[in-house]
Image (cartoon, rainbow, N blue to C red):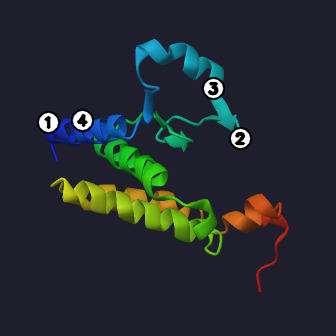
Amino acid sequence: MDIKQIEKYEKILRNTCRSYKINVIDVSLPSNKKFREKQGKKANGKEWFNNSSSCVDMTIYLGIYKNKSFRLISFAHELCHILHDSFASNMKNTTFYNELMVWYKAFKLLNSFGANLSNETICWGLDQAKTYIGWEEREVLNYDKESRKEI
């Protein structure tokens, strides 16, 4: 997908956000330098916004990406969290399963707009979902992978 197509689909996503009154903060913009400096070191001392986006309530924090296709699918992913996530209905599933379903919805959303995502972009999105395998053990139960003995 070329840069013009990516910009077209990003504009569609931004218009969708506007329709649902979802704020989008693009942390890559020079005007958000203070935000980056203030929020920069979050997870394990790494800049959380490099190749990463997030959402809180009705706000999407669109990260900094070298690969514009990865940025586009991440944007769609965070939008799908806001539009489709239901905490109560997802409690019965693992975090990995829920993340995988939101990535699937993001792929499906962009596909409905006519976006033709590359295999590299799809695999990158799935790799992001895979980071949630075992999330409950690591985060909820203070899982210590180093001390775990393989059976």
Q: Position of residue 113 (x, y in %)?
A: 19, 53
Q: Which residue is mark 2?
A: 44
Q: Which residue is mark 3?
A: 39
Say whether disc 4 or disc 3 marks the residue closer to the N-terminus.
4
Tag 4's secondary structure? helix
**Above or below, comparing residue 106 to residue 147 in the picture:** above
Tag 3's secondary structure? helix
Identity, as a three-letter code, of the amino acid under mark 3: Gln
Viewer-nearest residue: 120 or 40: 40
Which residue does the image show at 58% across and 69% down from the upper left? 89
Viewer-nearest residue: 43 or 103: 103
| Distance between mark 4 and mark 2 Cα atoms | 33 Å
Q: In the shown orientation, is residue 139 left or right of residue 81?
A: right
Q: In the shown orientation, is residue 45 left or right of residue 122?
A: right
**Above or below, comparing residue 133 to residue 72 in the picture:** below
Identity, as a three-letter code, of the amino acid under mark 2: Asn
Which residue does the image show at 53% across and 42% down from the upper left? 55
| Distance between mark 1 and mark 3 Cα atoms | 31 Å
Say whether disc 3 or disc 2 marks the residue closer to the N-terminus.
3
Can residue 117 be seen by looking at this rendering? no
Viewer-nearest residue: 127 or 27: 27
Q: Which residue is mark 1?
A: 4
Q: Which residue is mark 4?
A: 11
Task: Give the number of the mark in front: 3 or 2.
Answer: 3
Say whether disc 1 or disc 3 marks the residue closer to the N-terminus.
1
Which residue does the image show at 78% across and 61% down from the upper left? 140
Identity, as a three-letter code, of the amino acid under mark 4: Lys
